[in-house]
Image (cartoon, rainbow, N blue to C red):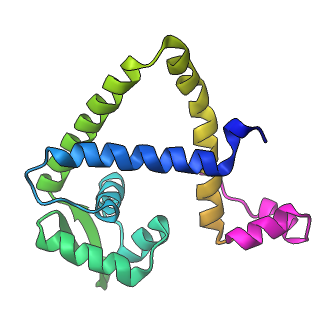
Amino acid sequence: MTAATEPSDLENVLAGLTRLIRRRLRAGLRLPRLRGAEIELLRLVRERPGLRVSEAAKELGLAGNSVSTLVKGLVELGMLERVADPSDGRATLLHVTPEADRRLLEWQERRSVLVQKHIDRLSEQDRAALTAALPAMRALAASLHEEAESGIGVEDAAEAESGSGAVSEYREGEVGI
């Protein structure tokens, strides 16, 4: 692994970019601020309307009670609606409200404008490097998502990579994204 692809360097840059973008976008907000986990939940429900709390928890990698708390707060803010599941009266399905949809679209637009403004300031060579890196970044995200879906933890994955029998079970049981 070269110095340019050291995991800690990559992690720090990605976390730093996310944090800086979020801070810059929040600076101009007049509305109540939403936390990162709340935004993630809203995005997920927007992408998959009718999601159950348990499905959202699994997808986000959070405990069910944590997602229930997020849902409760977002319902109180008028951002999420709980709708009774017609096939199971005990369960509820989640849907974003028009207000949440509007805020997500506004946030997405503001984020795109902000990032594009700073990409435009880069040299042509740096812009080309960013474009060239996108397929690898997507592959990295898919790999992390796949591992999370399989239920294999970091230690288990390291063990699998070292050549134990778990590797063949993991690879045979992989599910595509």
- Taking the image as shown, residue 39 lies to the left or right of residue 11, namely left
Residue 43 placement (x, y as % from top left): 32, 54
Who is closer to the viewer here, 177 or 62? Answer: 62
6 and 74: which one is in front? 6
Picture mark count: 0
Res. 87 visible in picture = no
User: Could you tell me residue 70's position as x and y percent?
Assistant: 28, 74
Residue at 47%, 65% in the rendered image = 59
Q: Which residues are magenta?
A: 153-177
Based on the picture, tell me whether residue 54 belongs to the magenta stretch.
no
Magenta stretch: dominant secondary structure: helix
Q: Residue furthest left?
A: 30
Q: Is residue 25 above or below residue 171?
A: above
| Position of residue 106 in the picture relative to residue 111 (left or right) | left
Q: Quadrant of residue 111?
A: top left
- Can you say which quadrant of the picture contains the N terminus? top right
Is residue 175 covered in magenta? yes
Decide if residue 56 is in sight here. yes
168 versus 99 height, above or below: below
Q: Quadrant of residue 169?
A: bottom right
**In the figure, is residue 104 to the left or right of 7?**
left
Residue 40's x, y, as percent?
A: 35, 58
Residue at 69% of width from left, 45% of height from top?
Answer: 6
> Taking 170 as reference, is 74 left or right?
left
